[in-house]
Image (spheres, helix red, strand yellow):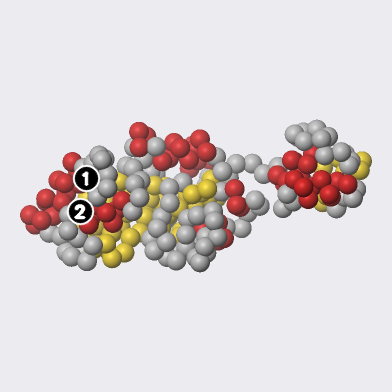
Amino acid sequence: MRLDRFLSETTELTRSLAKKALHRGEVRVDGEVIKNPATQVGEANRVTWHDEPLALVGLRYVMLHKPAGVECTARRTLYPRAIDLIELPKVERLQPVGRLDVDTTGLVLLTDDGQWSHRVTSPKHRCGKVYRVTLDEPLAGEALARVVEAFAEGVLLDGEESPTRPAELAMREPTVAELTLYEGKYHQVKRMFAAVGNHVVALHRESIGPLSLGDLPEGEWRELTADEIAAF
């Protein structure tokens, strides 16, 4: 890897700022001041900037308990971002593995491993996502049976050309549902209930595949274990 790229990968420096740091003699490779940005470095080399050793950041896998009022986006908006809650080097490289709306709470996975993210989100892998849905109107009896059947068969959402994939619906309380989805269309949960004449008051994602929030407090995060990463 080029030395200027290595610096931009391991510090907050951009490539242009890395070249300036090199020109000023701030960077050493194996104890020697190096000014050439095209110098090749590898794992065997010891690179320091202002005498601080640098190391490449590997792939990261993070679980976040997202509060309401936080966006799953890379761009800065009026709301804080999910990555703003995570204290890791180069945190801006982490991408959400399936987004949640700004007012939706619950489990968000973030990673810089694109292949792993695809395995989690691809509908063909049937990775179920479980939501706790608070409804405006209670569901019970024949009305509930009709909605359960409709969701199991697939619902044609407004503006879509094909119905949703089969989803599983169960009621915990008259106005609190548990919905399991195997895909992730835009505002899907809200649109599905709107299609059957109901309104979502609150939405919380409890789990993605085998991963659940457990006792992770709202607003907190942790890195996944090796077994959790390998579960997908």
- Please rate how many residues cluster around mark 1, counting C-alpha atoms within 10 Å: few if below 14, some from 14 to 19, many from 20: some
On screen, residue 198 above or below 5: below
Three-letter code, disc 1: Leu
Question: On the picture, is 108 further left or further right than 86?
Answer: left
Decide if residue 11 is in sight here: no
Question: On the picture, is 93 further left or further right than 181?
Answer: right
Quick one: quadrant of the N terminus?
Answer: top right
Three-letter code, disc 2: Ala
Image coordinates of residue 190 in percent, x first then y, are: 28, 56
Residue at 16 percent of width and 49 percent of height? 148
Decide if residue 226 is in sight here: yes
Q: Which mark identifies residue 195?
A: 2
Find the distance from the CA under tag 2 to the CA under tag 1. 8 Å
Q: What element carries label 2?
A: helix
Image coordinates of residue 195 in percent, x first then y, are: 20, 53
Question: Pointer 2 and pointer 1: residues touching (CB < 8 Å)?
Answer: yes
Residue ID for mark 1: 156
Image coordinates of residue 164 in percent, x first then y, are: 26, 43
Image coordinates of residue 131 in percent, x first then y, are: 32, 54
Residue at 42 percent of width and 61 percent of height? 102
Nearest the viewer among 126 and 74 is: 74
On screen, residue 214 above or below 112: below
Quick one: quadrant of the C terminus?
Answer: top left
Image-quadrant location for residue 33? top right
Residue at 77 percent of width and 47 percent of height? 16
Q: Is mark 1 on a helix, strand or loop?
A: loop
Residue at 54 percent of width and 53 percent of height? 74
Image-quadrant location for residue 43? top right
Question: On the picture, is 118 further left or further right than 192?
Answer: right
